């Protein structure tokens, strides 16, 4: 199966390797570009949280935090954190909602928590944690929109050489639709089976009138499983 992978380049390459191992052919469409932000990182916290491995892109700046209890969203984030010198996270949550719930349960009221965040993010996690702890947010990276789709992705869409597309966030799906329109291949998207990691990620695709399958669980394993399921 020929799969369009719609995410940042580094993440897309990792997904492409997984797809190749499963017998699929991946076409990378990096609609987001990661830019690490040079920030002064404070210390003296009771806990550190992160929702993406990109938060650890400048590990030397985080050295003073490595012994602080860490909680994250996703196994990949936990793996990158360990590579950056952190201990195994105390909490590895499936999503931001679960992380907020678990942190509120485990932390004392007023605990000092540092959130290593992306510049473009949903406010849900910080809103939930801000009610129960003293939350400091430091934006350590930005996910910036790509200027255009790669020629390989455009040609694949033009020639009908894409069977399915994987979408990992609402923002990346919206950017993908915009870039596809600018490249003149928006009409080809109706012939592609779109798979979204969550209902939230699917929203721009649904608004565009595309048929979207939602992964059973909000993770990549479930997205890849969904490739084999057809109505």
Image: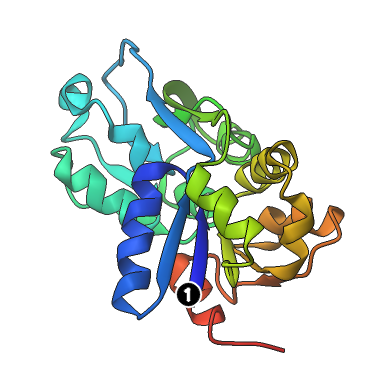
For the C terminus, give its image quadrant.
Answer: bottom right
The residue that appears at 70% across and 55% down in the rendered structure is: 200
- Judge the density around disc 1: few (<14), some (14-19), many (≥20) Cα neighbours within 10 Å: some
* In the depicted structure, whether residue 16 falls above or below residue 163: above
Which residue bears the numbered disc 1? 224
Query: By what rule are the colours in the image chosen?
Result: rainbow
Examine the image and state in which quarter residue 81 appears. Answer: top left
Left or right: residue 194 versus residue 95 is: right
The residue that appears at 76% across and 50% down in the rendered structure is: 186
* In the depicted structure, whether residue 224 falls above or below residue 46: below
Badge 1 marks a residue whose secondary structure is helix
Left or right: residue 32 versus residue 10 is: right
The residue that appears at 46% across and 66% down in the rendered structure is: 220
Q: Nearer the viewer, residue 30 or 66?
A: 30
Q: Position of residue 202 (x, y in %)?
A: 71, 58
Q: Nearer the viewer, residue 106 or 64?
A: 64
How many badges with numbers are in the image? 1
Q: Nearer the viewer, residue 186 or 209?
A: 186
* In the depicted structure, whether residue 40 falls above or below residue 211: above
Q: Position of residue 73 (x, y in %)?
A: 42, 52
Q: In the rendered image, is residue 96 in sight?
A: no
Q: Position of residue 37 (x, y in %)?
A: 38, 17
Left or right: residue 171 versus residue 2 is: right
Q: Position of residue 146 (x, y in %)?
A: 54, 31
The residue that appears at 64% across and 62% down in the rendered structure is: 198
Q: In the rendered image, is residue 129 in sight?
A: yes
């Amino acid at each position: 199966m020929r799969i369009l992978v719609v995410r940042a380049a580094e993440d897309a390459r990792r997904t492409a390797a997984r797809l190749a191992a499963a017998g699929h052919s991946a076409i990378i469409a990096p609609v987001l570009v990661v830019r690490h932000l040079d920030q002064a990182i404070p210390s003296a916290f009771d806990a550190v949280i992160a929702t993406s491995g990109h938060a650890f892109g400048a590990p030397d700046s985080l050295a003073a935090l490595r012994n602080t209890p860490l909680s994250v969203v996703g196994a990949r984030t936990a793996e990158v954190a360990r590579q950056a010198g952190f201990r195994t996270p105390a909490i590895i949550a499936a999503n931001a909602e679960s992380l907020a719930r678990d942190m509120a349960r485990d932390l004392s009221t007023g605990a000092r928590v540092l959130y290593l965040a992306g510049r473009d993010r949903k406010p849900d996690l910080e809103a939930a944690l801000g009610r129960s702890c003293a939350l400091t947010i430091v934006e350590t990276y930005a996910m910036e929109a790509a200027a255009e789709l790669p020629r390989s992705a455009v040609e694949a869409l033009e020639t009908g050489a894409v069977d399915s597309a994987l979408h990992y966030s609402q923002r990346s799906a919206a950017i993908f639709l915009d870039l596809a329109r600018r490249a003149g291949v928006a009409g080809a998207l109706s012939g592609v089976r779109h798979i979204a990691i969550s209902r939230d990620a699917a929203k721009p695709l649904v608004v565009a009138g595309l048929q979207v399958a939602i992964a059973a669980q909000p993770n990549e394993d479930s997205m890849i499983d969904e490739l084999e399921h057809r109505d």
